[in-house]
Amino acid sequence: IGVTRVWILFKMASTEPLIPQEQEETGCYANLKKCLKSTVKALLLVLLIVFVLAWIAQFACFYWATLGCSASKLEGYTYPGGGKNASFNLMPAIHLLAERPPLWYGSAFEVIPSNEASTVAGAPVGTWWQTPGPIFPIYTYEDVANSQTTVYMRRKLLRLGQSHVIQRCDGKGPVVHFSEGWSFFSNRLRKWLKMNQAMSYKIYVDDALVAVAEETQQGFQSITFRGVQEENKGRELASSVLQSRHFHGKYDVWLVQNKEEDVMLPDYVSSATTLLYAFYTLHQDKRDVSSVAKDKAHTVPNFLAEVDKTNVSEHLTAPLEMPVETEVKVAEVEMAQPPKFV
């Protein structure tokens, strides 16, 4: 026992650890491993900082876009330019969405009253604004009478496919949202096959499914809103169509028509849905123009062949003329010959 105690005390006094430790790796592989770990940590830190800054910028853009959108500022508001039942519909039942020149802080479509003849029936009553954001854009409707924001629309995240919510600034009325849901897969398939009716969306009013929106992307771009409840199943509630692409020479204009007998969907719902399709069409046009420009840039020039054809045609059509120097020499030879006497 005494020997054992001495041995333990000797081990405790020595520098060798009682529990053997793993030896650190050395060499090129160890240095590379340390470098990779440091790089991964740095990238994760940068991504975290970018993520936080993006959401801060998104909140700032949302605050700027919805500035003045509050129930206190709309208390007792009469909603001028709202047409029939203005406090419910907020805009005319039949109106035009006319593209405006984009500004540095966003793009916009004017809301212009229309009629059964699909013509301009008055001055603009409001404007749909698109305020860009780092994560998603914000859409707000501002009337012309008092420059008051009355409704806004934003995208809902963590949803399958597209999903947007439409809310009034006064807190009254229903909360409307429309989304693809499980139609996401069939929508992409129909779009890839270039079918006439490509995209379809479900429209919910206070969590109750009331209608579907069907987009037509082949031929004339349009949206048809149909009821799904028993009292209006399959019946058309509203519609919109791209009426012209040359409004004031170069702008798009959409015609939005709401049925008077429809009391379930406010008129601003069809207008907001059409607005998304209108901006999608504009972005698609820009991509098509850029792709055409790239194709032209990569096309092999054939100007040499055109020049050769031009030269050939000139040779065929131009008269044969004697050079001036040859004419001068011929004249000198004739003058040098002696006159001939008969």
Image (tube, rainbow, N blue to C red):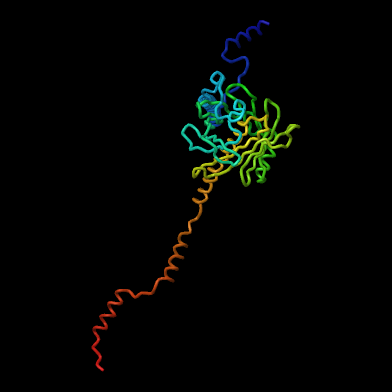
Q: Residue 113: which quarter of the image?
A: top right
What is the quadrant of the C terminus in the image?
A: bottom left
Residue 244 appears in the rendering: yes
Viewer-side residue, 1 vs 220 = 220
Residue 68, position as x, y percentages in the image: 52, 22
Residue ID at (67%, 29%): 263
Residue furthest to the right: 230
Viewer-side residue, 22 vs 342 = 342
Q: Residue 242: which quarter of the image?
A: top right
What is the quadrant of the N terminus in the image?
A: top right
Residue ID at (58%, 43%): 243
Residue furthest to the bottom: 342
Residue 313, position as x, y percentages in the image: 44, 68
User: How many circles with numbers are drawn on the protein?
Assistant: 0
Q: In this view, does 222 lie above or below 340?
A: above
Viewer-side residue, 38 vs 156 = 156
Q: In this view, does 92 lie above or below 222?
A: above
Residue 33, position as x, y percentages in the image: 56, 29
